[in-house]
Amino acid sequence: MQMILTTAEIRAILQGCQQTLRLVQSTTEYRLIQSSPYFSTTNDVYIGDAVNVLGELVEAIDQVEQITQYKEGILND
């Protein structure tokens, strides 16, 4: 089954994930886990990196929408 999402829904999901990760990142429990000498990721990434990537994805979506709307405006003139 293929799910169809609008651009607004995709943006909302990504922003929701970003906010959820910020919430997790702000907890004492997570900070304790991350500060453990046993905490390690393959690429040395942290939740903050994921938050930043999600923000960049939302910005890229916004840019595509702006360019698309601009081009559609030119074609309709």
Image (cartoon, rainbow, N blue to C red):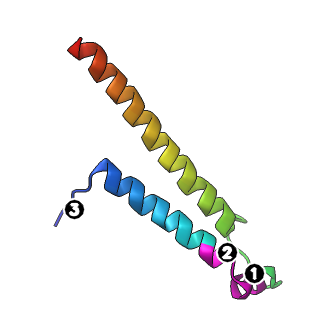
Q: Which mark is residue 31?
A: 1
Alpha carbons under labels 3 and 1: distance apart: 35 Å
Q: Which mark is residue 25?
A: 2
Q: Amino acid at mark 3?
A: Met
Q: Which mark is residue 16?
A: none
Q: Nearer the viewer, mark 3 or mark 1?
A: 1
Residues at discs 1 and 2 in contact (Cβ within 8 Å): yes
Taking the image as shown, residue 75 lies to the left or right of residue 20, namely: left
Instruction: Give the SS element for disc 2.
Output: helix
To which quarter of the image does residue 4 belong?
bottom left
Q: Which mark is residue 3?
A: 3
Q: Nearer the viewer, mark 2 or mark 3?
A: 2
Magenta stretch contains residue 52: no
Q: Residue at x 47, y 65 (%)?
A: 16
Q: Residue at x 56, y 47 (%)?
A: 56
Instruction: Find residue 31 and report its horizontal and vertical position in percent.
Output: 75, 81
Task: Check the image and report above or below for 67 versus 5.
Answer: above
Q: Residue at x 73, y 66 (%)?
A: 44
**Quarter of the C terminus within the rendering:** top left
Alpha carbons under labels 2 and 3: distance apart: 30 Å
Taking the image as shown, residue 31 lies to the left or right of residue 2, namely: right
Give the mark nearer the N terminus: 2 vs 3: 3
Q: Amino acid at mark 1?
A: Arg
Alpha carbons under labels 1 and 2: distance apart: 7 Å
Q: From which residue to which does the magenta span run?
A: 23-33
Task: Check the image and report above or below for 8 versus 31.
Answer: above
Main secondary structure type of the part rendered in magenta: helix
Mark 1 burial class by Cα count in 10 Å: few <14, some 14-19, many 20+: few
Give the mark nearer the N terminus: 1 vs 2: 2
